[in-house]
Image (cartoon, rainbow, N blue to C red):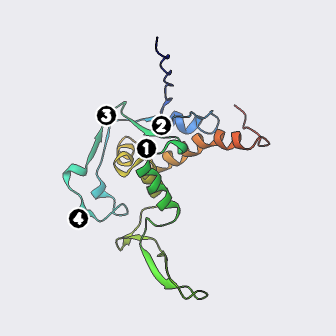
Amino acid sequence: MGAPSPVKKARPKFKLEQFRDVAIESKSQEVGVDLDLDAGVFDPREHDTIADTSDFTDDDVVRVDDGDVVHVPHPLMLDDPHQEAFDKFNRREDVDQVDYIDEESGEKRSKAQYPYTIGGAPAPSDTYRMAAAIIGERELWRLLAGGGHSNDVALAWEYLTRDTRMDRDPKAQRPPR
């Protein structure tokens, strides 16, 4: 007789409007959340701040149907490529760098060029770049096509980390449920 199979925990599924309303007051889920999308189309060529339009083709136009979902993973469950992208975002290594000489050590170093650019073009917002790092740019485009915003990923991230922070600090007061 084999060991019982583990019980799969269902991910919560929210309409975007619902999620925005309940995220602040809800208990986080260990596996992440699914954001329920509305039918829509997203064409990255129409958004100058996302990237240079010459890099896109018709294959990059994203279409979603009602009920399609975008999964936002729990911060402790990011796969390696997304974790690396998120770490690069946090270190500002996802934007163009400028070299300089450290005055104290005399060593050559680099830092993020400000205002932020990617490939010489203005970089998308921090929230957009963070969301792209967490769920991937293609999934972010699906979210945008379905009526979502990059801030929805940031809100989901906060929602998923709240109880993790509370569990680490026993003195922290949990928000009312």
Q: Categorize mark 3 by other alpha carbons within 10 Å: few (<14), some (14-19), many (20+).
A: some
Q: Which residue is mark 4?
A: 54
The image position of residue 125, as x and y in percent, is 46, 61
Q: Secondary structure at mark 1?
A: loop
Q: Whole-percent x and y of residue 1?
A: 46, 10
Residue 31 lies, in percent from the top left, at: 51, 34
User: Which badge, 4 or 3, is on the more N-terminal residue?
Assistant: 4
How many numbered tags mark residues here? 4
Cα distance in 3D space between marks 1 and 2: 7 Å
Q: Amino acid at mark 2?
A: Leu
> Is 44 drawn above or below residue 108 in the view shown?
above
Say whether disc 2 or disc 4 marks the residue closer to the N-terminus.
Answer: 2
Residue 65 tag number: 3
Residue named by callout 2: 16
Residue picked out by circle 1:
148
Q: Earlier in the sequence, mark 1 or mark 2?
A: 2
Indicate the amino acid at tag 1: Gly
SS at mark 2 in the image: helix
